[in-house]
Amino acid sequence: MCTGRGAGAIGLESLETAAAHPRFDAITGGVASVTPVEPKPAASVLLVRDAAPGAPEPLEVYMIRRNRGMKFLGGYYAFPGGKVDPADGEPTALARCRGVEASDAEAIFSGHEGSPALAFWVTAVRELLEESGIMLACDGAGRALDASDPRTGEAIERCRKALMAAQAPFPDLIAREGWYCDLRPLRYLSHFITPRSSPIRFTARFFLGPIPAGQEPRLFTEETSEGFWIHPAEGYRRFLSGEMKMAEPAEYGLAYLAQFAALDDLWAAHRDGRHKFQGIADRIDVLWNNFDWKANRFPSLPFEK
């Protein structure tokens, strides 16, 4: 996987130490007896950048906090993402992709869930725009957006507002601007499926991506209450201490990123385009068996205000 380790790195062997976290105290084992909900396809992106010179860790990753009032994991920390819309898998959407061929996407996702594999990449681009204002796009010749041009910034904002207002499907909106989804920066990372006990379930694909030149994520409060950069190992330590609540995809993602000594090392490890780890469904089902999905907490933990 990776041999480089940054200062304060955790390493994947530490993933199993999460069992010592207080959230596991009430777990007794077994799986829910109710018929599980069919998981919906979803995609998320881990935006990663170099940390400032002299920082205690070499990397930073962008995280959001879901609004506490949300039915699914309200108040939890996560990465920008959301469910695959039907329009994300339409031929018009797939035709507006550059950098990953549909056949290559199908080879990476064997046995994916109901949508063309490339639709997950489209969702990743769309959700980044919705939740962080980041637009991964290029023109027909493959030239990335010049975000230093004020007109480009205005176009990105115009596209996001129209998307949030449901004025048109995402492929139509970027077509109006003459843009294509630029999938070249994205690297597939992992696959997680929500526990069977959850009344809302997702089968989610996670991607890595750098920040496009001239762009910076912003906080939008439709679904999130916080948006911030954090060192991966620091985020993982805050999870273990109970300061930051998160589910396995965020927990594992932070621990994975904490292994790397440099951003170049991370990208080098992902040249093959293949995923690096996945959630083990049976293990996750057991761990979340006693979770109170209405209160979004484990019974052994005090309710967070």
Image (cartoon, helix red, strand yellow):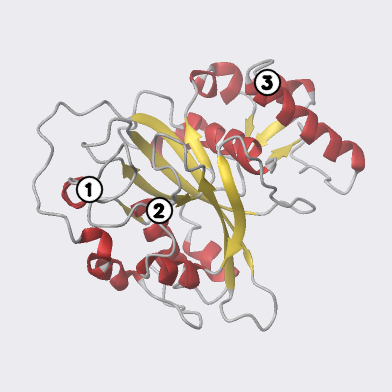
Alpha carbon distance from label 1 to label 2: 18 Å
Q: Earlier in the sequence, mark 1 or mark 2?
A: 1
Q: Earlier in the sequence, mark 3 or mark 2?
A: 3
Q: Residue at x 53, y 77 (%)?
A: 261
- Going by the numbered disc 2, the residue's amino acid type is Glu
Q: In what element is the residue under mark 1? A: loop
* Residue 10 sits above or below residue 25 on the image: below
Residue 16 picture location, percent across and down: 25, 67
Counting labels gives: 3
- Going by the numbered disc 1, the residue's amino acid type is Trp
Q: Is residue 248 left or right of residue 291?
A: right
Q: Residue at x 32, y 33 (%)?
A: 201
Q: Identify the residue position indicated by label 2 in the image.
A: 304
Q: Are marks 3 and 2 in contact (CB under 8 Å)?
A: no
Q: Identify the residue position indicated by label 3 in the image.
A: 165
Q: In what element is the residue under mark 3? A: loop
Q: Nearer the viewer, residue 235 or 46?
A: 235
* Residue 260 sits above or below residue 217 on the image: below
How many residues crowd around disc 1 within 10 Å: few (fewer than 14), some, or many (20 or more)?
many
Mark nearer the viewer, 3 or 2: 2
Q: In what element is the residue under mark 2? A: loop
Q: Is residue 143 left or right of residue 124?
A: right
Q: What's the mark number on residue 288? A: 1
Q: Residue at x 21, y 37 (%)?
A: 197
Q: Is residue 102 left or right of residue 148?
A: left
Give the quadrant of residue 250: bottom left
- Going by the numbered disc 3, the residue's amino acid type is Ala
How many residues crowd around disc 2 within 10 Å: few (fewer than 14), some, or many (20 or more)?
few
